[in-house]
Image (tube, rainbow, N blue to C red):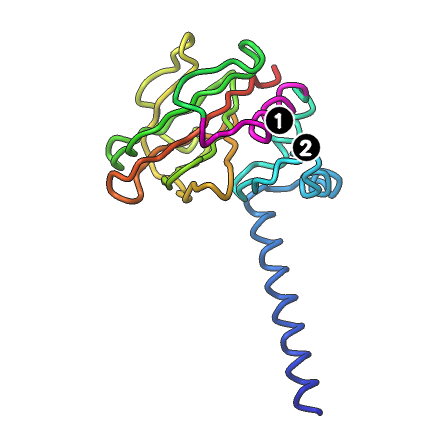
Amino acid sequence: MEKKCQLKSTMVIFISFFLLSLNSMAQKENGNITKETAQWYNSHNWLNGLKLKPHRSIDQKEFARQYRDNKTGWDKAFEYLRTTDLEDIGPGTFQIDGKNVYVIITEGPGKTFEQGKWESHRHYSDIQYVIKGKEWMGIEPFTSLKLTEPYDGPKDIAFYTGEGKYYIGDPEQFFIFFPQDAHRPGIKVDDDAPVKKIVIKVRTGE
């Protein structure tokens, strides 16, 4: 009986340590955020019923600010993800709310690591979700990278080179990249296996 109690206590301590470690990792990913912001974000009420999982790399503090400044746009973006048959829809660019929110759907083989470029945008945040397949997605503050192609206003894009963190994008989770987040998406994982992907561009709060 005493051995069972000791084992149970050990398991409780291990699980508690594991949960604390996960919480610590999330705090490191997101810097210092208020308790209220963390509770709001983790409630997932802002997903409006969307069952997809937000990736842990998402800057929760910045998302809360962007959501507050353009709630209508973000709500429309998540509603589109929730209600659209993404398996059936073909590649193309589609408007949800004019230039405030629009969609780009692509399908095809990923890029090699050398072909992939770091990029950032000033006027839009990206929701990026892999509908089918897998790809590597890089993320790093653009201030940590070296600018290789200056900002192009009409295209809302600048390019960089440098090192960063990489995560697997798959149908289980979505990413959000804000203007301060340089990102390097679309890098192949499994040779030339096709990847179907949606990018929803949401205008940032000015």
**Residue drawn at 35 percent across, 35 percent down:** 195
Report x, y in % for residue 6.
Answer: 67, 85
Q: Which secondary structure lies at badge 1?
A: helix
- Relative to 49, does residue 96 appear above or below in the rendering? above
**Residue drawn at 41 percent across, 42 percent down:** 165
Classified by dominant secondary structure, the portion drawn in magenta counts as helix
Q: CA distance from mark 1 to mark 2?
A: 7 Å
Locate the N terminus and report the quarter of the image it occupies.
bottom right
Query: Where is residue 183, by image quadrant?
Result: top left
Binning the other alpha carbons within 10 Å of mark 1 as few (below 14), some (14 to 19) or many (20 upward) gives some
Locate the C terminus and report the quarter of the image it occupies.
top right
Query: Where is residue 115, by image quadrant?
Result: top left
- Amino acid at pointer 2: Asn
Query: In the image, which residues are magenta?
Result: 72-88
- Amino acid at pointer 1: Glu
* Residue wearing tag 1: 79
Report x, y in % for residue 12.
Answer: 67, 72
* Residue wearing tag 2: 48
Q: Are marks 1 and 2 in contact (CB under 8 Å)?
A: yes
Report x, y in % for residue 129.
Answer: 47, 34
Give yes or no for residue 86 being in the magenta stretch. Answer: yes
Binning the other alpha carbons within 10 Å of mark 2 as few (below 14), some (14 to 19) or many (20 upward) gives few
Report x, y in % for residue 169.
Answer: 43, 41
The label number, if any, that marks residue 148 in the structure image: none
- Relative to 86, does residue 43 appear above or below in the rendering? below
Q: Tell whether 65 sits left or right of 53.
A: right
Q: Tell whether 114 sits left or right of 63.
A: left
Q: How many marks?
A: 2
**Residue drawn at 57 percent across, 36 percent down:** 59
Give yes or no for residue 81 being in the magenta stretch. Answer: yes
Query: Where is residue 67, by image quadrant?
Result: top right
